[in-house]
Image (spheres, grey):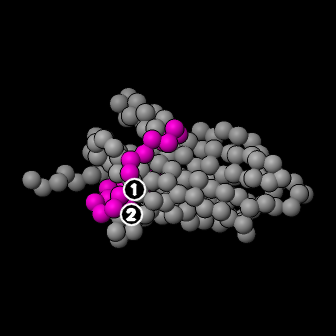
Amino acid sequence: MRFRASVLVSAALVLIGCKGELCEGDCPDIAGLYQIQVVSVTGACGFSSLTLGPSLDLAQSADGRRVFAEVIDPTNDLRLLVAANVSNLEEGEGGSFSGFSQFASTARAKSDTPPQPLQVLLTGTVVESDGRLQLSGFLSTRQLQPEFCSVDLVFTGLGPFVTPAAE
């Protein structure tokens, strides 16, 4: 039950945009393979939104300032890379990430209307709890024209075990 409560708090913080400052040198290590635990979807649009697979692999740059994750275009069966900046959390251990991409070539419609570019926002918070990394995130697929529409996924994931630091 403690996991679910911490996940809900983290998800709420992600949704309202509470993040720490962008890391400059001492970036939190949030890389890892996260098994997606919960996904809730809101919104219905005239396009097929991007989605996540059963797991999400966060790959972190060598300097720790960015993470990269793949989202899935289910219509074209493609994996699309989204890059995100890493931030330190204001309190406690862990980190957050936020990235934005626009995919013009993969935009598609469910109807006969011409496809429009899709904008993708991927944000998340990673904290350590019970010896494991835990992820709370938000994936939004947006179309701005011919009229604004958004499909939003809120998700959580259980990540790798954390090795205690040597004292």
Q: Specify which label sits upstream in the sequence, 2 or 1.
A: 1
What count of labels does the image hold? 2
Q: Main secondary structure of the magenta part?
A: loop
| Residue 26, magenta (yes or no) | yes
Q: Is residue 25 above or below residue 91?
A: below
**Quarter holding the N terminus?**
top left
SS for callout 2: loop
Q: Mark 1 — residue?
A: 22
- Residue 3: quarter of image: top left
Looking at the image, the residue that sits furthest to the right is 112
| Residue 124, magenta (yes or no) | no
Kindly tell me whether residue 13 is visible in this rendering. yes
Q: Mark 2 — residue?
A: 65
Q: Is residue 3 left or right of residue 143?
A: left
What range of the chain is rendered magenta? 14-38
* Cβ atoms at labels 2 and 1 below 8 Å apart: yes
- Residue 41: quarter of image: top right
Q: Residues within 10 Å of mark 1 (few under 14, many from 20)?
A: some
SS for callout 1: loop
Q: Position of residue 97 (x, y in %)?
A: 45, 53
Q: Is residue 71 left or right of residue 89?
A: right
Rendered residue at 48%/35% (across/down):
12
Q: Amino acid at mark 1?
A: Leu
Rendered residue at 56%/42% (across/down):
154
Q: Amino acid at mark 2?
A: Arg
